Structures are given as structure tokens and as C-alpha cells.
Image: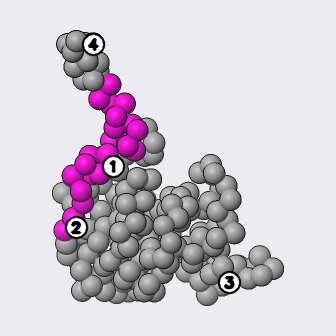
Amino acid sequence: MAYDKFTVLISTAVPLPIENVDTDQIIPARFLKATERKGFGEALFRDWRYNNDDSPKEDFVLNNPKYNGKILVAGKNFGCGSSREHAVWSIYDYGFRCVISSFFADIFRNNCLNIGVLPAQVSDDFLDKIFKAIEADENTHIEVNLPEQTVTIMATGESESFAINGYKKNNMLNGYDDIDFLQSLKGDIQTFTATRPF
């Protein structure tokens, strides 16, 4: 498998109520030299998390110990800017398995689906409800149900559906990237080719 299977995720969430967060803010360009998906979590929001002397910025949410979990709740238009897939590598490597927002840049959304981070797009109103629920209680749990394609605020039971491409949904449920998917068809391909004349 290319990454962990995603079915139903129930977790606390980290709120980042900032709109138009681009991929250079998610991971600065100076960290793009590596070609292996290792160690990128440390570079996630690097310039927002750390001062020039590498000391943590106390007012940034990832440095606040009361917030944690596998879900990042982000403001509208998350992942805009350049197409670097390293941005999603850093999100995955940090430990997030889902990003909830009311709008994603298309290339960023596709990179998420290829790498194993579920981009769950909800309405502006429902996103605001999630932010308010976390503000009221940082231990609020969010359920992200991929088979049912729903996001639910566990404390209130309020829920909203999200859309996802059927092929990408199947891949995420199985932990497949595109190559894994093709390999899963190996038996069918061999059976088919065996009946074909050369």
C-alpha cells in the first residue's frame, strides 16, 4: 500500500482559520530539494511555526499543546499557489490524515488524494460551525466518514456531506495510489491477455 487505508476517522482537530493559505506557506520552497517522502513534517508551516533562531513561535496553533489530532481544519481556499506535492507530503508526514475546508485549490486537492490525505470540502456555514465547536472545546471530536462521505461534529450531531471522485474514493479506502490500483488488477489483466492472440 502507498499509504494507510482511510475509512472512518474520529479525532480532535487543529484549527487554522486563515483564508488563502498557499503551498509556499504550507512548506517554503527551500525545503523542496528532497525527493523522498521523509522528514517533511518538520517543515510544515515552518516560517509560521519557528523564529529565525529556530525557537517556536508560541502564538502559532501547531505550537499550542491544547490542540492536536489527525484533522486540520483550514480556512477557505486552502492550498492555492504553486502545484508542489511536497505541501501534502508535509501535511501527511506531520500526522494529519484529513483537511477540512470550504474550498481547495484543484491541484492541491488532487495531490491530497494521490498521497493519502482526504480533502473534505464543506460549506462556509458548516466550516464556521466546526471552528466555533473547537473554540468552545478543544477536545471536540470530528468524525470524517469516507464510505458515507460525511463530516460530523460529534458533540452536536450536526453533519454535512462532501463530494469525492469515485475512483479516488476507492483508492483511499484501499490505501492505493495509481500504481497500486493498476497492480491490484494484475490478475484480471493476465487473464485477459491470456485470451488474446499475439
Question: Mark 4 touching mark 2, by CB under 8 A?
Answer: no
Q: Quadrant of the N terminus?
A: top left
Q: Answer yes or no: is residue 94 visible.
A: no
Q: How busy is the neighbourhood of tag 3: few (under 14 within 10 Å), some, or many (20 plus)?
A: some
Mark 4 residue element: loop
**Mark number displayed over residue 57:** 3
Labels 3 and 1: the sequence-earlier one: 3
What stretch of residues is rendered in magenta? 161-186
Tag 2: residue type? Phe
Q: Which residue is mark 2?
A: 162
Q: Which mark is residue 172?
A: 1
Q: In the depicted view, which residue is nearer to us: 141 or 116?
A: 116
Q: Is residue 170 magenta?
A: yes
**Amino acid at pointer 1:** Met
Residue visible at 31% across and 79% down?
102
**First-in-chain label (2 vs 1):** 2
Please tell me whether mark 4 or mark 2 is closer to you in this view: 4
Dot 4 crowding, Cα within 10 Å, few <14, some 14–19, many 20+: few
Quarter location, residue 161: bottom left
Structural distance between the alpha carbons of marks 2 and 3: 34 Å
> Are the residues tagged 3 and 1 within 8 Å (C-beta)?
no
- In the rendering, at what x and y percent does residue 12 appear? 41, 69
Gap between marks 4 and 1, in whole Å? 36 Å
The majority secondary structure of the magenta stretch comes to helix
State the image coordinates of residue 177 (x, y, percent, origin top left): 40, 44
Q: 105 or 16: nearer the eye? A: 105
What is the C-alpha distance between the residues marked 3 and 1?
34 Å
Q: For the point 52% across and 64% down, which residue is it?
A: 84
Left or right of 152 on screen, residue 178: right
Residue under label 4, please give it: 198
- The mark tally for this picture is 4
* 47 sits left or right of 141 in the view: right
